[in-house]
């Protein structure tokens, strides 16, 4: 992240300038308190995607996702087409973590 802080314009002029990390945390807290799973999915996926976009905007770029992680995220996007049923988050690597309700297993 130190390299991203120094070189990523998305980090400097997007996320940090607009205080997105704090705003996303606050919105996520509300989604969890109100049990709004659709909002939880949207926030979790967007946060994950934004962090990976920053990695790609870092110079030199950091590319953590691989073909399998991209396939999994595409599958989740397809499942969520009509209704949010699964959220994903990808660590600073290629590991994809999935979140779903027991009723959607």
Image: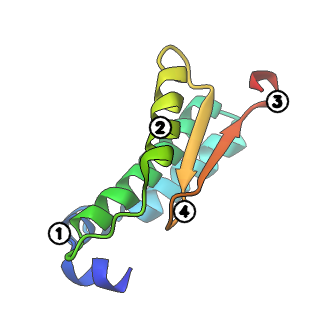
Q: Which class describes the residues within 10 Å of circle 3: few (<14), some (14-19), or many (20+)? A: few
Q: State the residue position of label 1.
A: 9
| Lower sequence index among marks 2 and 3 | 2
Asked if residue 45 is positioned above or below residue 3 in the image, the reply reads above
Give the Cα distance between marks 1 and 4: 21 Å
As drawn, the label of residue 91 is: 4
Q: Give SS at disc 3.
A: helix
Q: Which class describes the residues within 10 Å of circle 2: few (<14), some (14-19), or many (20+)? A: few
Give the Cα distance between marks 2 and 1: 27 Å
| Lower sequence index among marks 2 and 1 | 1
Quick one: which residue is furthest to the front in this view?
Answer: 67
Say whether residue 45 is visible: yes
Q: For the residues carrying marks 2 and 3, which lies nearer the camera in this image?
A: 2
Q: Which class describes the residues within 10 Å of circle 4: few (<14), some (14-19), or many (20+)? A: few
Asked if residue 20 is positioned above or below residue 27 in the image, the reply reads below
| Lower sequence index among marks 1 and 4 | 1
Q: Is residue 19 left or right of residue 71?
A: left
Q: State the residue position of label 2.
A: 71
């Amino acid at each position: 992240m130190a390299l991203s802080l120094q070189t990523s314009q998305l980090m400097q002029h997007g996320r940090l300038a607009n205080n997105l990390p704090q705003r996303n945390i606050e919105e996520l807290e509300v989604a969890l308190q109100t049990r709004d799973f659709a909002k939880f999915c949207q926030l979790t996926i967007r946060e994950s995607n934004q962090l990976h976009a920053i990695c790609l905007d870092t110079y030199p770029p950091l590319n953590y996702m691989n073909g399998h992680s991209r396939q999994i995220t595409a599958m989740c996007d397809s499942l969520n087409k009509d209704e949010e049923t699964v959220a994903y988050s990808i660590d600073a690597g290629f590991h994809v973590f999935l979140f779903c309700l027991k009723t959607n297993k």
